């Protein structure tokens, strides 16, 4: 399965080969695919599973969009991790457990960075929310790629 995905990505990378390295292309393709999966799962969960209704648990009531966010995250988090581990940063020689913990931390930091950037751009810079979201996405994706390459899935140099 891994080789099949590599072959498909290599085929589509050819027109972009002079513009970006294969690893960057894999990151964009896998991350974009996982993001689309996340949005699709959110949409299905919110509209068809939860039917836009509040979720009443024994000790708390959760709004339907937060519950749908959690439901989508339960699938997209492991999918994103596995794609990054085996497809994008397959050269990493760190232990899988270390990668998973680092990936979880990075996802949390990215969520916080999304929140801070959106607040900053919309409320303090008075940017239109869609423009703020585009700028935020560029910042967060760039930060995420560099962090995953240099920290989460780095290649440890053996002495």
Image (spheres, helix red, strand yellow):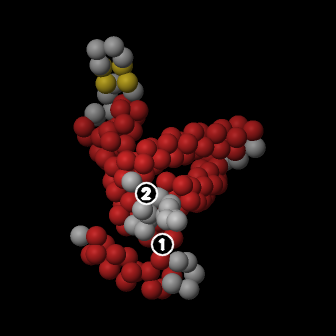
Q: Is residue 60 above or below residue 43?
A: above
Image check: 117 left or right of 159?
A: right
- Residue 130 visible to the viewer: no
At 49% from the left and 65% from the top, the residue drawn is 158
Q: Position of residue 57 (x, y in %)?
A: 29, 19
Q: Is residue 68 above or below residue 13?
A: above
Q: Position of residue 16 (x, y in %)?
A: 51, 82
In which quarter of the view is residue 4 placed?
Answer: bottom left
Determine whether the residue tagged by mark 1 lies in a helix, strand or loop.
Answer: helix
Q: Residues within 10 Å of mark 2 (few under 14, many from 20)?
A: some
At 42% from the left and 62% from the top, the residue drawn is 93
At 28% from the left and 75% from the top, the residue drawn is 3
Judging by the rendered image, the residue that carries numbered circle 2 is 94
Judging by the rendered image, the residue that carries numbered circle 1 is 23
- Front tag of 1 and 2: 2
Determine whether the residue tagged by mark 2 lies in a helix, strand or loop.
Answer: loop
Q: Are marks 1 and 2 in contact (CB under 8 Å)?
A: no
- Residue 71 visible to the viewer: yes
Q: Position of residue 17 (x, y in %)?
A: 51, 84
Q: Which mark is residue 55?
A: none
């Amino acid at each position: 399965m891994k080789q099949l995905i590599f072959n498909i990505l290599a085929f589509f990378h050819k027109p972009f080969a002079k513009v970006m390295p294969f690893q960057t292309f894999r990151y964009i393709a896998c991350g974009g695919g996982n993001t689309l999966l996340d949005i699709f799962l959110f949409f299905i969960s919110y509209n068809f599973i939860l039917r836009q209704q509040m979720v009443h648990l024994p000790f708390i009531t959760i709004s339907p969009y937060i519950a749908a966010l959690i439901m989508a995250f339960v699938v997209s988090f492991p999918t994103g991790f596995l794609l990054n581990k085996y497809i994008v940063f397959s050269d990493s020689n760190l232990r899988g457990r270390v990668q998973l913990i680092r990936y979880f931390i990075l996802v949390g930091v990215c969520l916080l960075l999304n929140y801070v950037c959106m607040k900053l751009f919309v409320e303090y810079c008075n940017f239109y929310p869609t423009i703020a979201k585009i700028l935020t996405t560029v910042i967060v994706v760039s930060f995420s790629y560099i962090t995953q390459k240099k920290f989460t899935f780095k290649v440890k140099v053996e002495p």
